[in-house]
Amino acid sequence: MGSEESSRVVIPRNFRLLEELERGEKGIGDGTVSYGMDDADDVYMQSWTGTIIGPPNTVHEGRIYQLKLFCGKDYPDKPPSVKFQTRINMSSVNLETGAVEPHFFPMLADWQRQYTMEDILMQLKKDMMSPQNRKLPQPPEGNEDGRVDQKGIVLRCCIL
């Protein structure tokens, strides 16, 4: 009657996302990582924006990286898709699309239900400091032209 398996409480998706939203709005640690919802009217809480301020003593220092996180209907049982909106050269990121590639980013490849969007952002920041990423040449700042959003729409900014 009291087995461990039956006593494990599974928090419903929306409650979990509300917890993450509350935590994201309060700010995380030293303030170099933050996240929140894209659209307050998104009742499914699917589309999120994250920000990472590049860590010191790396080529990322002083840069502000914007990311999109998309939590599908199976989140948190399945990981969100994660995509840099800001151009970045990093071993786990597709240079053309900005997508974080799960097979190069173990946290997504070996996803566990208790992981959060905060964990993902903190791990990406940590990876920026890793030997293989800390000195990689970076695209020029302000070079976000041509990124494709989650719905496949090309985002461009131009002055006419």
Image: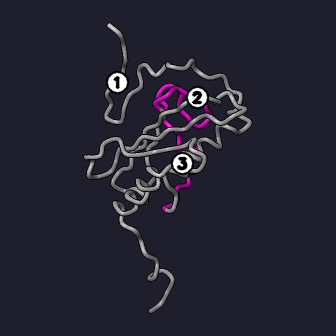
Q: Which of these two is toward me, 85 or 90?
A: 85
Amino acid under disc 2:
Arg
- The residue sitting at 65% across, 30% down in the picture is 61
- Circle 1 residues within 10 Å: few <14, some 14–19, many ≥20: few
- The residue sitting at 40% across, 68% down in the picture is 11
Residue furthest out toward the bottom = 1
Location of residue 64 (image quadrant): top right
Point out residue 57 in the picture as x, y percentages from the top left corner.
Answer: 73, 32
Q: Identify the residue position indicated by label 2 in the image.
A: 63
Q: Identify the residue position indicated by label 1 in the image.
A: 154
Q: Are marks 3 and 2 in contact (CB under 8 Å)?
A: no
- Circle 2 residues within 10 Å: few <14, some 14–19, many ≥20: some
Q: Earlier in the sequence, mark 1 or mark 3?
A: 3
Q: Are marks 2 and 1 in contact (CB under 8 Å)?
A: no
Q: Describe the element under mark 1 as helix, strand or loop.
A: strand
Q: Which quarter shows the C terminus?
A: top left
Q: Which of these two is toward me, 112 or 156?
A: 156
Amino acid under disc 1:
Val
Q: Describe the element under mark 3 as helix, strand or loop.
A: helix
Q: Is residue 104 magenta?
A: yes
Classify residue 91 as left or right of residue 67. right
* Residue numbers of the magenta segment: 85-113
Location of residue 59 (image quadrant): top right
Point out residue 53 in the picture as x, y percentages from the top left corner.
Answer: 57, 35
Point out residue 133 in the picture as x, y percentages from the top left corner.
Answer: 68, 33
Residue furthest out toward the top = 160
Q: Identify the residue position indicated by label 3 in the image.
A: 120
Q: Which mark is residue 139?
A: none
